[in-house]
Amino acid sequence: MNPPTPAPFTGAVFIATSLDGFIARPDGDLRWLTERGEDIGETGYDEFIAGVDHLVVGRGTYEKTLSFDEWPYGGRQVLVLSSRLEAEADPRVRVVPDLDALVAALAASGARRVYVDGGRTVTSMLAAGLVHELTITTAPVLLGEGLPLFGHLPRDVALEHRTTTVLGAGFVQSTYAVVG
């Protein structure tokens, strides 16, 4: 896969994983996170999301949000990266079929800082050089199996450590810049 033309936006990841690197159980369940997260304290998410003007999620992440009591993305523009979801699936989102269409849509809408969410989407955008920063909060639990944050990458992705913070309930949060 050839990377798309360099993007005029910064891609940022803000996500939680189990200690063994899973973002959800095999069936998409997140209770392992939400039940432990009640005592986590301030994570910086509100500040992070306040600095984001667009979100990019994969179909699986989008479909998981449909089970939430409230739409989690407020009035921000949400693009769903999917070749299977119908283009008119939901008026709150714009469906794009591939990374080239995604970059074009974000550039056309004037995106400056983009929140990237979902394991396959994070991996695809990392491989294409579209992620510039990763904030990963690690939960003190081993799931043994589940949906991994990172999949196959065609090459190493060098990272520069920025910060690590110990949060409540045994959670640890680290932020990295993608080098190069």
Image (cartoon, helix red, strand yellow):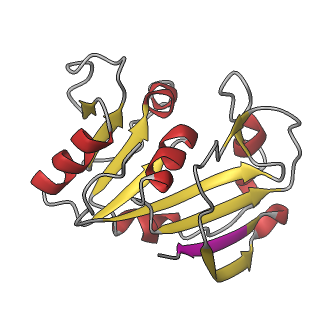
Asked if residue 109 can be seen in this view, the reply is no
Which residue sits at x=76%, y=32%? 146
Looking at the picture, tell me which residue is in the foreground, 50 or 154. 154
Which span is picked out in magenta?
A: 173-178
Q: Where does residue 118 sit, x and y in percent of width and height? A: 52, 42
The extreme left residue here reads 108
Which residue sits at x=69%, y=21%? 27
Q: Classify 118 as above or below 6.
A: above
In the image: residue 57, left or right of residue 171: left
**Numbered disc total:** 0
Q: Main secondary structure of the magenta part?
A: strand
Which residue sits at x=37%, y=48%? 2
In the image: residue 64, left or right of residue 81: right
Q: Where does residue 123 sit, x and y in percent of width and height? A: 54, 47
Q: Quadrant of residue 105?
A: top left
Which residue sits at x=40%, y=56%? 115
Q: Within the magenta stretch, is there residue 117?
A: no
Q: Classify 105 as above or below 98.
A: below
Q: Within the magenta stretch, is there residue 177?
A: yes
Q: Where does residue 73 sit, x and y in percent of width and height? A: 36, 46
Looking at the picture, tell me which residue is in the foreground, 138 or 178. 178
Q: Quadrant of residue 8?
A: bottom left
Q: Where does residue 61 sit, x and y in percent of width and height? A: 50, 34
- Quadrant of image for the N terminus: top left
